[in-house]
Image (cartoon, rainbow, N blue to C red):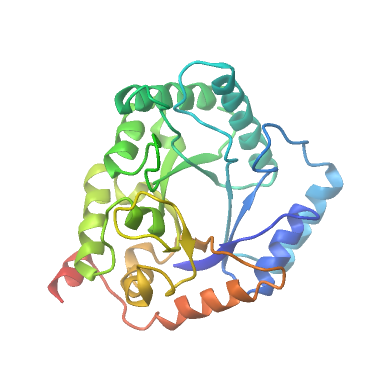
């Protein structure tokens, strides 16, 4: 895996790339605008030039975006749902201006309408957004969730239902978050558990649809449905649980970013990446090899 981190764009998006280089990251995830606002200003030419120069200087192996947290593609028809559509359209435009290949997006919450209705609404929203942004190559990677409240995405079946329902599946993929998997009830602490989970992803979604990983430990217990990230090896998944994740060679070329708590000097990111790299010593070739041990 191309180990990296979510990096702040404070001061300009180019600084996120410099922060990624500072912590020795091979990959970098960013917000393309303020993640708690509906709209953002387009990047001025000077900012885009700084971004291009920083990308050339730091040479990250992978850079991608994460959509804002206000966006809810599964929300019933409302003014907020309309804002979500417009916000996601703009985020794709911003991502395109930075030449990002995809944006990670939460599948949204049905807010009491029920899972079936929420999934259908998510498909309608994504079709609308894909139609409005057809000239851009930016894809959307739906992220699995812990399943708090009425949030969709806690089951792999949810992601599969959305991907099988959209009109242009080429524009979509998934992002797998380890903490969310665990909190949703997927016990990935063992090799067998990881193999079973990825086998389900392969069967329902397809491994070619996996675009990225979020590597986070979980503060909360298996099946808690509570999303609380912990430093690698300091949560309920533990170091051993990440060993078979980072050594799964099927995903060796995919970006895998930590989203763990950090302070301004980023020493936590450096330590978390150090822990993950320390586990890269027992390569696993296939799911069959995982389950045979």
Residue 279 shows in this picture: yes
Q: 20 or 84: which is nearer to us?
A: 84
Residue at the left extreme, as displayed: 292
The image shows residue 103 at horizontal and vertical percentages of 55, 44
Query: From the viewer's perspective, is 6 left or right of 43?
Result: left
**Relative vertical location of residue 285 with respect to residue 34 in this rendering, above or below:** below
Residue at image location 54% in from the left, 22% down from the top? 81
**Relative vertical location of residue 157 with respect to residue 259 in this rendering, above or below:** above
Q: Quadrant of the C terminus?
A: bottom left
Residue 24 shows in this picture: no
Dividing the picture into quadrants, the one containing residue 44 is: top right
The image shows residue 25 at horizontal and vertical percentages of 59, 70
Residue at image location 22% in from the left, 54% down from the top? 199
**Relative vertical location of residue 226 with respect to residue 204 in this rendering, above or below:** below
The image shows residue 124 at horizontal and vertical percentages of 43, 21
Residue at image location 40% in from the left, 38% down from the top? 149
Residue at image location 29% in from the left, 47% down from the top? 206
Query: From the viewer's perspective, is 243 left or right of 133?
Result: left
The image shows residue 246 at horizontal and vertical percentages of 38, 70
Dividing the picture into quadrants, the one containing residue 83 is: top right
Query: From the viewer's perspective, is 15 left or right of 240?
Result: right
**Relative vertical location of residue 48 with respect to residue 23 in this rendering, above or below:** above
Q: Quadrant of the N terminus?
A: bottom left
Residue at the right extreme, as displayed: 46
């Amino acid at each position: 895996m191309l180990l990296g981190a979510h990096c702040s764009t404070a001061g300009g998006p180019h600084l996120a790339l410099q922060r990624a280089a500072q912590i020795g990251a091979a990959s970098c995830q960013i917000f393309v605008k303020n993640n708690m606002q509906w709209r953002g200003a387009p990047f001025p030419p000077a900012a885009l030039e700084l971004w291009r120069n920083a990308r050339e200087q730091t040479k990250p192996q992978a850079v991608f975006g994460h959509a804002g947290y206000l966006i809810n593609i599964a929300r019933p028809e409302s003014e907020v749902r309309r804002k979500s559509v417009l916000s996601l359209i703009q985020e794709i435009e911003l991502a395109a201006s930075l030449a990002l290949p995809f944006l990670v997006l939460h599948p949204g919450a049905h807010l009491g309408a029920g899972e079936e209705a929420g999934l259908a609404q998510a498909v309608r929203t994504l079709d609308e957004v894909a139609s409005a942004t057809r000239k851009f190559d930016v894809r959307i990677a739906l992220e699995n969730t812990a399943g708090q409240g009425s949030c969709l995405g806690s089951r792999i079946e949810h992601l599969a239902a959305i991907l099988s329902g959209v009109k242009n599946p080429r524009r979509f993929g998934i992002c797998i978050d380890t903490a969310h998997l665990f909190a949703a009830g997927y016990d990935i602490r063992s090799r067998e558990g990881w193999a079973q989970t990825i086998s389900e992803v392969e069967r329902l979604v397809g491994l070619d649809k996996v675009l990225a990983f979020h590597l986070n430990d979980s503060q909360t217990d298996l099946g808690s449905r509570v999303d609380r990230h912990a430093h690698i090896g300091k949560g309920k998944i533990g170091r051993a649980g990440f060993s078979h994740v980072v050594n799964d060679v099927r995903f060796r070329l995919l970006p895998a970013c930590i989203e763990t708590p950090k302070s301004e000097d980023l020493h936590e990111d450096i330590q978390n990446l150090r822990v993950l790299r320390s586990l890269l010593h027992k390569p696993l070739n296939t799911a069959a090899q995982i389950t045979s041990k």
